[in-house]
Image (spheres, rainbow, N blue to C red):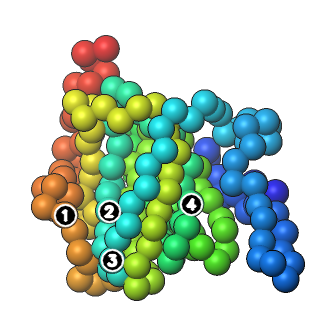
Amino acid sequence: MRFLETALPGVVVIEPDVHRDHRGYFLETYHSAKYAAAGIPGPFVQDNQSQSAQNTIRGLHLQLRNPQGKLVRVIAGEIVDVAVDVRPSSASFSRSVSVRLSADNFRQCYIPPGFAHGFCVVSAMAQVEYKCTTLYDPESEAGVIWNDPDLAIEWPVSAPLVSDRDRRLPRLAKLLEQLTRARASV
């Protein structure tokens, strides 16, 4: 198993060892001691799964008061997974990183708390599964619009399928105001 740092500190790509033979394959999709040794803390307390059609963009999502770390993997199809550092005091604030995850490459991506997360489906369909370090808190959810020009994310699609909710997400500057208010209320 390999743990690969990305351009954003804390965002890690995991390449598991895949054992193949004439019957198929086997791999560990999670091992708490190995992940902890690589700086990926647990515990994970909630698992989520989504299925999306080609050209769908989901995100960019985060939770304000109960930030979630996410361990993302694809069990069918392929996506471009995106993490954006939205921690105002971070040296990498507003920077993003993109990683291709697929059922064929078995890669995973860990996105730490304090990052917005989203993905774009590049195959005909994709099923995405991810573990979260905190429970979903609807009162704490927030996000950034996928096409914020200040982020300049290079999405692999020009006319994406986006939910009404995600279409109404604010730009990063507006989210920064929300983050400031959320910290003041703690």
Asked whether the beta carbons under mark 2 and mark 1 sit within 8 Å of each other, the answer is yes
Mark 2 or mark 4, whichever is nearer to me: 4
Nearest to N terminus: mark 1 or mark 4: 4
Question: The residue under label 2 is which amino acid type?
Answer: Arg
Q: Tell me the element at label 3.
A: strand
- Mark 3 touches mark 1? (CB < 8 Å): no
Residue appearing at x 19%, y 63% in the figure: 163
Contact flag, marks 1 and 4 (Cβ < 8 Å): no
The answer to whether residue 114 is left or right of residue 54 is right
The residue shown at (21%, 58%) is 166
Three-letter residue code for mark 3 = Ala
Q: Nearer the viewer, mark 3 or mark 1?
A: 3
Q: In this figure, which residue is indicated by the disc labeled 4?
A: 73
Q: Name the residue under label 3.
A: 53
Q: In this view, does 153 lie to the left or right of 14?
A: left
Of pointers 3 and 1, the one earlier in the residue sequence: 3
The kind of residue tagged 1 is Ser
Q: Mark 2 points at which residue?
A: 58
